[in-house]
């Protein structure tokens, strides 16, 4: 093993911080041995905070209608082949009811930036869910909104908000998005969410087009300094009906290595083994847990719409990714020494 990498990993494990240049060295020094070493320390750190508990979230994909045109995303507004849908309040409540029975105590409402999801509509859904399920956490992942809007959603009872920063490099951001989307707005939204008291999640795609060691190092530094409660990373996966259709997908190995590094940056992070990871490899979620992740988000959307929320080709949403298979998930986690728990799964401090 390259001695420097070994030392860098050890130092990150102790101080939870490196310089930008050191993060670059850490990424470009990837090797199987370095990844295994980082994973062993990441698992140790995670166990100190969370033991062997795995938190589950029921993912309800509320709409695939989106005003944005992100070049990488299958539900971008210009994709005319996307079969659009929007869940009603009743649909969302039915999904939550099913999820509650299955043992979910966090519901994640994720979707495109759909203008029909007004503050009034969302406040009503959140308040209703909170009245029926006071023991559950509500996570939103509905993109960029005004600070006033975020405030209304928070006051209605939403607990967490996931908004991936996508990349911490402005120029890179501009290559992934059309000019009507702005890096500064994205960052402003994240800051606003934090100020309002949400448990905030950021994140990025590993291997997104034009990503470099330098942009990835900035992502790591951003996570270190922004201190999110959650961080969603998964491989970029190609979608055939997007402008990036010829760009290769990201790698499983680098995603796992970065999961371990991010765990070392913050041992208390809620770190999901994402659907994209479960899509790129049938055992991707288990591998993610063994690299330092501690959250899994099975799909709780109505079966009829699951195949329509296609961010990338071949998205896993049935079988092991489905919330109905939570027993199978529990078994699979047990087989690698972990236990799926029935609770809100809030972030712990160490
Ligand atoms: N509209 C909300 C937002 O922008 O945060 C939530 C939905 S958005 C589709 C959720 C995430 O999916 C994005 O933040 C992006 O990182 C991820 N995503 C989109 N296209 C992807 C692709 N081709 N491969 C992997 N992840 C993708």
Image (tube, helix red, strand yellow):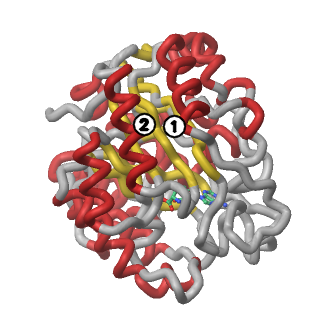
Q: Is mark 2 within 8 Å of ligand 1?
A: no
**Secondary structure beneath label 1:** helix
> For the residues marked 1 and 2, what is the alpha-carbon distance in whole angstroms?
6 Å
- Which residue is found at the position 77% from the left and 34% from the top? 304
Residue 34 in view here: no
Which residue is drawn at the image coordinates 54% and 37% (left, top)? Answer: 89
Q: Between 76 and 183, which is closer to the camera in this rendering?
A: 76
- 140 displayed left or right of 72: left
CB contact under 8 Å: marks 1 and 2 = yes
Q: Is residue 138 left or right of residue 117?
A: left
The image shows residue 204 at horizontal and vertical percentages of 48, 61
Crowd around label 2: few <14 · some 14–19 · many ≥20 (10 Å) = many
Q: Residue at x 39, y 14 (%)?
A: 342
Name the residue nearer the viewer: 208 or 174: 174
- Picture quadrant of residue 138: top left
How many numbered badges does the structure rendering display?
A: 2
**Above or below, 117 relative to 103:** below
Q: Quadrant of the C terminus?
A: top left
Ligand 1 sits in quadrant? bottom right
Residue 156 visible from this viewpoint: yes
- Disc sitting over residue 252 in the figure: none
Say few, some or many: other residues with alpha carbon within 10 Å of mark 1 (under 14 / 14 to 19 / 20 or more): many
Q: Secondary structure at mark 2?
A: loop
Q: Position of residue 93 (x, y in %)?
A: 52, 28
Find residue 293 and name its label: 2
Asked if residue 193 is positioned above or below residue 307 in the image, the reply reads below
Pointer 1 or 2: first along the chain: 1
Q: Position of residue 295 (x, y in %)?
A: 43, 32
Asked whether mark 1 lies closer than 8 Å to ligand 1, one says no
| Observer-nearest of 122 and 300 | 122
**Location of mark 1 (residue):** 288
């Amino acid at each position: 093993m390259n001695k420097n990498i070994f030392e860098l990993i050890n130092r990150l494990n102790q101080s939870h911080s490196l310089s930008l240049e050191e993060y670059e060295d850490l990424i470009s020094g990837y090797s199987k041995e370095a990844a295994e070493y980082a994973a062993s320390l990441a698992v140790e750190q995670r166990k100190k905070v969370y033991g062997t508990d795995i938190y589950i979230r029921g993912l309800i994909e509320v709409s695939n209608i989106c005003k944005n045109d992100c070049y990488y995303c299958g539900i971008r507004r210009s994709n005319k082949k996307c079969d659009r849908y929007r869940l009603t309040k009743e649909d969302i409540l039915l999904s939550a009811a099913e999820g509650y029975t299955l043992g979910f105590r966090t519901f994640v409402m994720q979707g495109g930036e759909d203008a029909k999801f007004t503050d009034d509509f969302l406040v009503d859904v959140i308040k209703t869910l909170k009245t029926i399920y006071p023991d559950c956490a509500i996570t939103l992942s509905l993109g960029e909104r005004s600070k006033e809007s975020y405030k209304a959603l928070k006051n209605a009872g939403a607990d967490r908000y996931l908004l991936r920063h996508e990349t911490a490099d402005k120029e890179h951001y501009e290559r992934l998005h059309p000019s009507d989307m702005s890096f500064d707005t994205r960052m402003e939204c994240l800051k606003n969410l934090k100020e309002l008291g949400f448990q905030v999640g950021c994140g990025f795609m590993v291997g997104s087009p034009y990503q470099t060691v330098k942009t990835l190092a900035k992502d790591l530094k951003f996570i270190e300094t922004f201190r999110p409660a959650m961080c969603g990373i998964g491989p970029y996966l190609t979608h055939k009906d997007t402008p990036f259709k010829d760009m290769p997908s990201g790698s499983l190995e680098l995603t796992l290595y970065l999961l371990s590094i991010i765990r070392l940056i913050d041992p208390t992070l809620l770190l999901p083994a994402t659907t994209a990871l479960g899509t790129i490899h049938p055992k991707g979620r288990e591998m993610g847990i063994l690299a330092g992740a501690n959250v899994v988000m099975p799909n709780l959307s109505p079966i009829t719409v699951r195949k329509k929320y296609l961010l990338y080709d071949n998205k896993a949403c049935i079988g092991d990714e489905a919330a109905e298979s939570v027993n199978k998930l529990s078994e699979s986690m047990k087989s690698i020494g972990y236990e799926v728990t029935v609770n809100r799964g809030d972030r712990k401090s160490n």
